[in-house]
Image: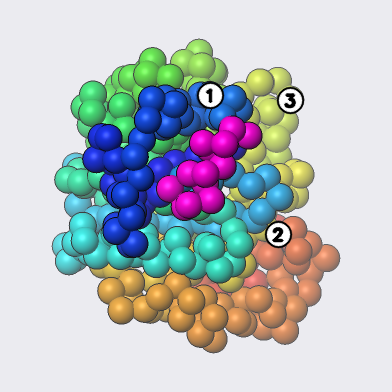
Amino acid sequence: MSYKLSRDVIDLGQYLMNVKTGELYEVEQDGRMLLSNLNTLEYLFNKSDIFNFMFNEGLLVDSSEKKDRNKFLLQLHLLNDCNLKCLHCYDWKDPVTSLTFEQNLVVLDNFVVFLKKMEMDGEISFTGGETLLYYRLIELIDYTKSQDVYIKPYVLTNGTIPPKTELLECLIRNDVGVQISIDGTEMVHDEIRGTGNYYKAVNGIKTYLAAGLKVSVHYVIMRRNIKAIPEFIREMERLEVKRINFSSLVPIGPGAQEEMLTPNENHDVIESIAFLQKEHSISLLSTRPLWSAVGSSGFCPVGYTTLTIDPSGKFLPCRRLPIILGDARYDTFFRVWFGSEFLQKMREREKYIKICGTCIKANVCGGCRAIAYALTNDAFAPDPSCWCV
Ligand SMILES: C[S@@+](CC[C@H](N)C(=O)[O-])C[C@H]1O[C@@H](n2cnc3c(N)ncnc32)[C@H](O)[C@@H]1O
Ligand code: SF4
Ligand code: SF4
């Protein structure tokens, strides 16, 4: 369990004030001790009168993860500015006007209301562009974790910008997961992401790990980096990374089309990584749909448990599926989630999604709707990267 001071409460030292009611509560020594040890000594106070009083008065709120609840995933693109120009990236086109910091706070409030009503926990991936270039990242993460609903934050980064101490402290205090993108061993990574960037990203991994953070590595599989995979796995294991998320390329970036694998190549690479998993303790399996063929949980959450807000503030079903569902400046999560005809059709997959919707694997795979859309302009088409169709 994890408790926090409610967002409606200001700590004035000797008093707590509920800013909604104007009520003042005097805090004596025991109360002060409870407040400063909420997460470490919670078990001692859990049943104490003072704890019960504060909890019943709404001064303390429960923001712990509920193991039996579903998670709703929000991918929040804070900007599309970036210090790199990776070959395959969908995100380095025209500059866009991103949401302001204040608009992002409204989005977060809106998300919290949605999670509460849906009785779900949340997960937010803060991403970009390059996330570390966002000027108020620390405040956004702190704000996210101050809510009285459980939200697990992740920061997605190319790892090349050394994090400042204040950012590391923020990531630690908020138990933030860090995902660093590396797309090959040094030579191939630098071909895709620019010279010198492998070295910088590896230093990034070392820095976050040394600070005690959980780091996973994201590897987009492309034609030019398939051969590097076995050596790459060994390199990440030497660094003591616990997980590599292998991911499929979606052909929407400027250099992405030529890097797509054929369905048979796709099959072979997935099988070979599943085989390598048997020899390595580092976790290698992806959550992309076709990985269900090797026992991974691949089911695509579009229409079920995810939404994305792109760098211009548009709601999308997924960042790789550029179908606009609304605008985060004006639309609530409820309006988008329950009002979108597109999402409703995604939920009725057997009726609308061709082949994948009635495939024996419809409920564990369903195909990647983003790849289908990128290659056919129809998000309901069969997944063209599947070797079964
Ligand atoms: C857009 S980046 C943003 C965060 C950060 N700049 C980074 O590189 O990790 C997030 C992830 O999307 C991946 N990505 C970009 N373009 C892609 C594409 N066309 N298909 C699949 N993944 C892509 C990147 O490789 C990266 O792992
Ligand atoms: S993948 Fe990340 S680092 Fe590379 S250009 Fe895109 S946003 Fe920038
Ligand atoms: S046909 Fe579609 S649902 Fe069936 S295995 Fe292939 S991609 Fe998955």
According to the picture, the residue beneath numbered tag 1 turns out to be: 41
Direction from residue 171 to residue 388 in the image, left or right: right
Mark whose residue sits in front, 3 or 1: 1
Residue 129 drawn at (x, y percent): 27, 51
Residue 354 drawn at (x, y percent): 68, 78
According to the picture, the residue beneath numbered tag 3 turns out to be: 278
Q: Earlier in the sequence, mark 2 or mark 3?
A: 3
Q: Earlier in the sequence, mark 2 or mark 1?
A: 1
- Say whether marks 2 and 1 touch (CB < 8 Å): no
* Callout 3: SS: loop
Amino acid on which disc 2 is placed? Cys
Amino acid on which disc 3 is placed? Lys
Amino acid on which disc 1 is placed? Leu
- Say whether marks 2 and 3 touch (CB < 8 Å): no
Answer above or below: position of 270 versus 205. below
Residue 137 visible in the current orientation: no
Residue appearing at x 56%, y 42% in the figure: 52
